[in-house]
Image (cartoon, rainbow, N blue to C red):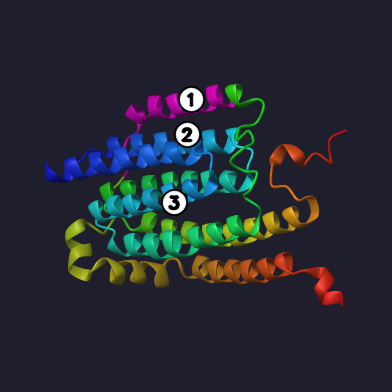
Amino acid sequence: MVNQLLFLYCAVVIIGTGLMAVRFKNPVYSVLAVMVLFFHMAGLYLLLNAEFLAAIQIIVYAGAILVLYLFVLFLVSLRQEVKIERFIASHRVSTVVSVCLGACLLAIIPSFKLGAKGQYPVERIEQLTHTKAMGLELYTNFILPFEIAGLILLIAVIGGLVLARNEKEVNE
Amino acid sequence: MIPLSWYMALAAVLFSIGTYGFLVRRNIIVMFLSMELMLNAVNLNLVAMSHYLDSLVGHNFVFFIITVAAAEAAIGLGLVIVLFRKKKSIYVDHINELKG
């Protein structure tokens, strides 16, 4: 009962802040609404017994990625942003398309069937602790994707540096 | 006990909100934010499913998705900075050089 109430609270806040984030005139408010959304998403992960992912969600998403968004927002000019039109010309068609997509996704949910059970029931994860269980899985079955993820991060670091560099200053 | 379909419904709604924001907004930074919303909807689905399937595969997928989202944000926002430097604008309908 308490879990269901907690889920409903998180769901309402997530949908509300999501809608706010895409509707707000000022993009800074959008970023702040998405931050609230990410915190409630971490709450849902806690409900699903994924403590490590909840921590990662707050540290990486709310802590690092959103701050990066805020910095870039302050780098580009915001002066005229609140005065001019925020939607593209064909936004009515886009609204219809996304509402239809949502309706289709909701309509196919009842036909979903769960497959075979895995080998990590909740009791085992609780006994091992979630971080350890995830680490065991990550460093045995997912070691190659883990290495590739490191490579992707390296590419992102180099790419970000190269892209954001001011070429005029470098040439002088 | 919360049924799995509640999580899936929430994820579907969040995904379509993200699609709406991506299709409707002119500001390219808010478009990137909408993309993060879509990634989060998928993450929620993966974590919920792997909880109900007694598995950890979904959790590891979410770990990798968060990594790739961080890389995507870094590269995408770098592109936004370059775009703003060249065109003094971050609106998608001002970027139309390739239009015939």
Quarter of the picture containing the N terminus of chain A is top left
Q: Magenta: predominant secondary structure element?
A: helix
Q: Which residues are magenta?
A: A94-115
Question: Could you say whether the residue bearing mark 3 is in a helix, strand or loop?
Answer: helix
Q: CA distance from mark 3 to mark 1?
A: 24 Å
Of callouts 3 and 1, the N-terminal one: 3
Is residue A122 found left or right of A37 in the rendered image? left
Instruction: Report the disc number at residue A99.
Output: 1
Local packing at callout 1 (Cα closer than 10 Å; few below 14, some 14-19, many 20+) is: some
The answer to whether residue A114 shows anywhere in this view is no
Q: Position of residue B67 (x, y in %)?
A: 50, 62
- Residues at badges 3 and 2 in contact (C-beta under 8 Å)? no
* Same-chain status of marks 3 and 1: yes
Q: In the rendered structure, which amino acid carries the disc numbered 2?
A: Ser
Is residue B97 found left or right of B56 in the rendered image? right
Q: Chain of mark 2?
A: B
Question: Could you say whether the residue bearing mark 2 is in a helix, strand or loop?
Answer: helix
Local packing at callout 3 (Cα closer than 10 Å; few below 14, some 14-19, many 20+) is: some
Q: Position of residue A43 (x, y in %)?
A: 28, 53
Q: Chain of mark 1?
A: A
Residue drawn at 35 percent across, 42 percent down: A14
The residue under label 3 is A32
Q: In the rendered structure, which amino acid carries the disc numbered 3?
A: Leu
Residue A114 in magenta stretch: yes
- Residues at badges 2 and 1 in contact (C-beta under 8 Å)? yes
Q: Chain of mark 3?
A: A
Q: CA distance from mark 3 to mark 2?
A: 20 Å
